[in-house]
Image (spheres, rainbow, N blue to C red):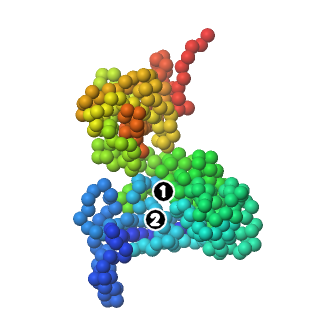
Amino acid sequence: MSSVIQVENLSKQYRLGQVGTGTISHDVNRWWHKIRGKEDPYLKIGESNDRTVKGESDYVWALKDINFEVQQGEVLGIIGRNGAGKSTLLKILSRTTAPTTGSVKIKGRVASLLEVGTGFHPELSGRDNIFLNGSILGMTRREIQSNFDEIVDFAGVERYIDTPVKRYSSGMYVRLAFAVAAHLDPKILIVDEVLAVGDAEFQKKCLGKMKDVSETDGKTIIFVSHNLSAIKSLCSSLISIKNGRIDGDGDVNEIINKYLIDDSPKRRLENHLFEKRSGNMKAVFSSFNIKNPKNEIVEKVFSGDDIILEFGLKINDRQLKMIDLGFSLHNIYDEILSYTYSSFQNFDIVPNGESYMTVKFILKRLPFTECRIFIKGRLLADGVESDWPSESIGDFNIENGDYYQTGKVIDKIAPFLITGSWF
């Protein structure tokens, strides 16, 4: 199988807050070095792409020393936290921006879906934009026409096909944009997290289409997503990017596990590194621990164990009368397994003017086989959302144990264990 994308020693440097180098003196300095055949002086400076620390330089390497190959028909996934450099890499692969150093060799026609409305003219109708995008991809009007009905049917926008796309909702925009990109015969399809704008049914439809064109038509796909479940089901290989560098590549399951271990929820909670944390912040999560019945902090438990979820809360408004604490359990692909709120059991959490307080929940007889569980939390203060981190606040590992208390350890065949009475 031949290589269709080769990325060698790719790096991209930006100057923060500026376009280009930002000053005439810097531009002249670069030009002067170039005509003398010398290296760009600004390539010797710059800091790594770590948004969690304050830097000393105006220059930052959004990407640094990126190397990989993609084979024809391969579905390559790319994961990483926001700001890691994923979108910058896709823009370079899509030729919408140029690398600072290194090279990218691409064989074949590329269709990109990087953000809502990429390549669409807002004043033109959906029909006109289909033909415009096809022309940009180098297709004849007859070739576009032969795919037109299929594109409209897939996008589900037939009623609005002659309406200017500026009047489309973001979901309709994405539906049509993806349909165009997937059906107008590109050899390489590049898709960013933009699919998250669509509804669940359409996302599933898109994943199925990408899988189909890869397996049936031999098209190459590069897919960036925070949805690890979608990554696992679609991708044949995976790259993890951290601070602008490749942190791991190869087997999908191995890279996902490494990514999750490195991206510790505890570290995010203690350092307030959540991508999004909504609410009025009158009460917030300040700590989280998993404990056994002996009140010892643990990171590993067994099927059938009782565990204690210990939530530390910081109260920023001493006038609060009542807090409703909710949490949900998720697997490594962020699929929700179950959830509850303190109000479901009429349990009142009353701050009583305290600055900090601890709330505990006993989760009895864990009904899971071997897996890793992530905890997400949400706080309501006097009925109003107070703190809802977008990411997990804690996690723990479950190993197969004696769930039935018969001395028999059940292997992992299904994620859940059930119990009842035989008669």
Residue hosting label 1: 78
Can see residue 215? no
Q: Tag 2's secondary structure?
A: helix
42 shown above or below 69: below
Q: Earlier in the sequence, mark 1 or mark 2?
A: 1
From the viewer's perspective, tell me whether residue 118 is left or right of residue 374: right
Q: Quadrant of the C terminus?
A: top right
The residue lying furthest to the front in this view is 319
Can see residue 107? yes
The residue lying furthest to the bottom in this view is 35
53 shown above or below 11: above
From the viewer's perspective, tell me whether residue 68 is left or right of residue 174: left
From the viewer's perspective, tell me whether residue 129 is left or right of residue 143: left
Q: Amino acid at mark 1?
A: Ile
User: Residue at position x 30%, y 22% from top?
Assistant: 294
From the viewer's perspective, tell me whether residue 158 is left or right of residue 61: right
Residue hosting label 2: 89
Q: Tag 1's secondary structure?
A: strand
User: Residue 328 occupies which quadrant of the picture?
Assistant: top left
224 shown above or below 350: below
Q: Quadrant of the N terminus?
A: bottom right
Measured Cα–Cα span from mark 1 to mark 2 = 10 Å
